[in-house]
Amino acid sequence: MVLVIVIIVVAVLLVAGGAALVITRRREHPRVAGEPLAPPPPRIPADLDVPVPTVEELEALLEAPAPVVEEAPPPPLPEVIEKPRLRDRLGRTRSAFAGAFGRVRGRKIDDETWDELEEALLLADVGISTTTRLLDAVRTRAQEASISEPDDLVGLIRDEVTVLLDGDTTDRTLHASPGEPNVWLFVGVNGVGKTTTIGKLASQRVADGHRVVLAAGDTFRAAAADQLQLWAERTGGEIVRGQEGADPGSVVFDAMAAANSRGADLVLVDTAGRLHTKSNLMEELKKLRRIVDRTPGACKEVLLVIDATTGQNGLVQAKQFAEAVDVTGIVLTKLDGTAKGGIVLAIQSELGIPVKVVGVGEGVGDLITFDPKEVAAALFEGDS
Amino acid sequence: MFDALSDRLDGIFSRLRNRGRMTERDVDEVSRELRVALLEADVNVRVARDFISRVKERAVGEELSKSLTPGQQFIKIVHEQLVETLGGTTGKLAMSPKPPTVVLLAGLQGSGKTTAAGKLARLLKSQGLHPLLVGADLQRPAAVEQLRVLAGRVDVPFYSESTDPVNVARGAIAEAQRLGRNIVIVDTAGRLQIDTDLMDELRAIDAAVEPHNTLLVVDAMTGQEAVNVAEAFNEAVGLDGVILTKIDGDARGGAALSVKEVVGKPILFAGTGEKLDEFEAFHPDRMASRILGMGDVLTLIEKVESTFEEEEKRRAEELLESGRLTLEDFLEQMQQVKRMGPLQNVLGMLPGMPKEIRNAEIDDKEIGRVEAIIRSMTPAERRKPELINGSRRTRIAKGSGTTTTEVNNLLKQFKQVQQMMKTMPGVARKVKGKKGKKAKSGKGPRTPLGGGIPAGFPGLPEL
């Protein structure tokens, strides 16, 4: 078996070229730690095409998803249907942070303070590199302002988080132009909540008086189309579905045609969950995108759905999906648990993809616009 | 994406001029890097802390081996500790003396319970058991339907009713007895561990059917939250084991360690793909390598197994043993390798690759060019590249739509690879002789890659 692997390596080396040869000369000695290798520098990956939300349709923009749903859908809703505030839902998160800060309070700022802050951010899945960057910035500013109270640090961190999330300038609206079929494509790995998000969005939009067509582009998972169908029945949207195992491209194509002929103004395309490492499935996704783009009233949003419990892999996911289909925004789901979804900080700061909406519960109203200031405040205001 | 831990540790150790034994200071210094590596792999902050202190205890005073760099040796210790913590044995389900045995699956939304239920049924059936699949997820629209379809695909009877989950579970036991099924797999709705109503419901199901195996289904991509989830579910229903799903992605899967630490019960199975047969016993050693970012040789081997035909494998090995590689052989091998997916991914699975190679951006189109060049040669030229003179070179370049420089480069590189191959036969034979035996760290066969794969690299399991 070793041999087969070697064959592969040889193949790789031959193709990868020069870098390979360095090792062959080195084979007599195990590599001495730290000894510099001197191969030609690896080609730097082409810069990611960071999607920038278009502003040209500004006039035509519709409102951000209206959280108010006029009529309660058939299943009983646990919550009163009114706009849930993110901060209410983040209550548990907040207290978790308050706990971390609580320990450092009333003392001098020392190493332990920073350790506690670091741990709190790490526990929120912010990730070690973003956390370090964040805290370095805070440390500098704290020195400049000669801050000595841990409480004041909290304000600084909050500012930095808002800066990181580009709080003031980022466009977080879901784009749609009136009078033509708009398309929002939902992508993501398996089990993040794509279908549920579409269900919630559909009911909000239908309640706002839009004509919505749901495209059941997940033809892979058993009964995925059934799941979407139930949402369609609940919300009064229309659904276009194909056979299980059918080409999702044809489903999307039919949905676009159906939207045109029925005068619908919004098509929500569900896609099968796929791991970003499966190149064939990512190719399929690109194809879906092309089909959508071909139809007039081109693709307005490509939303990557990310589960708040996702760890550092979330950044890799975002990178890969953005490369494949130009993601325009993130939907952060399941934020009603104790998971904090801190990975979106890294995603926004490194890839410039903003979080647009967040899911905070199982009810249809529990999908709300993302407000970075609110998040930053909710995360870092200890309830003293 | 991430630097392999080995590269970083080697860097640190090279600064420490210390030989003999690992001192506490050495270990402290490298522990910081280990922490970063664990955190990047999504191991919980607190779990990482405990784990590191255990590693420290073990590493301090360890005599430095002559054949390993201190960095490698430290990683070896970490790796062993990881394997140990993740659970040495790959567990089995507890069987009830009085059938049916009940397996209850629980977890967060979207962790993959329904799919895992279908896959588990298939696996158990192939082991000669008679499973019954039970759809007790009455929460998510069409979840029951999804499981019904899966049950049909794996040809296992299915049971559900539209009352409430407790009744479904209870009814399922009676149904299993009626049908003579000896193992019942109950799929439940996804729930947040802080949702008191749903957690109460889970407790009620647990009390009603007294499962012999209550398994927590955890997504390998889960971050810090894994600990809270495991803690809460364990407290509520007492877990007996864990199923780790979606490990076919590129998440490092530190959640596995976090969950294992909290639950203290084995990770029994792992979901390795979308297809129903992509589900297997959990391998702690593979997971350990993965968490440390050391590549995953075993996965690679499996991939090779599934893409290369027996005959092709034999040929490749012969080729290597003879030590003679022609461009023709190379072209053929290339076709096989291509079937394994993007070269970059394949490369990523190899442990111990120097950073320069691992990070080299490999364009698969490049393979096409190489192929075109070789294909533009006559068979004689492919077998004997020395034949290629100036005018042949021009012809080949024209024929393949490349330049003579490119042809030159390929030939030059090929020559070097050939030389490398020539030094290999002895090694190859030795390796073959040892196949099946554990390559002892430090004394393992020097692979033909020499410095490429550090000798005795702890991530290289039995090959």
Image (cartoon, coloured by chain):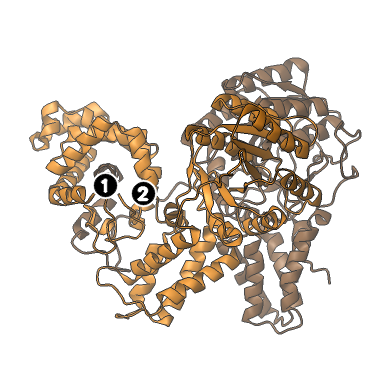
Chain colours: A brown, B orange
Q: Residue furthest top?
A: A261
**Left or right: where B346 falls relative to B268:** left
Q: Residue furthest left?
A: B387
The vertical placement of B418 against B337, above or below, is below
Tell which of A247 and A353 is nearer to you.
A247
**Left or right: where B127 falls relative to B432:** right
- Where residue B419 appears, as percent x and y from the top left, is 14, 48
Q: In which quadrant of the rendered view does residue A189 lie?
A: top right
Circle 2 residue: B297
The vertical placement of B91 against A101, above or below, is above
Residue A140 seen in render: no
**Left or right: where A61 falls relative to A240:** right
Circle 1 residue: A2
- Where residue B207 appears, as percent x and y from the top left, is 74, 48
Disc 1 element:
helix
Q: Look at label 2 and name its amino acid.
A: Val
What number is the disc on residue B44?
none
Task: Please give the chain letter of the residue carrying mark 2.
Answer: B
**Left or right: where A21 falls relative to B367:** left
Disc 1 packing (10 Å; few <14; some 14–19; many ≥20): some
Disc 2 element:
helix
Q: Look at label 1 and name its amino acid.
A: Val
The alpha-carbon separation of the residues under discs 2 and 1 comes to: 10 Å
- Where residue B120 appears, as percent x and y from the top left, is 55, 38
Tell which of A106 and B55 is nearer to you.
B55
Task: Please give the chain letter of the residue carrying mark 1.
Answer: A
Q: Which residue: 36% across, 77% down?
A: B62
Q: Which residue: 29% across, 62% down?
A: B441
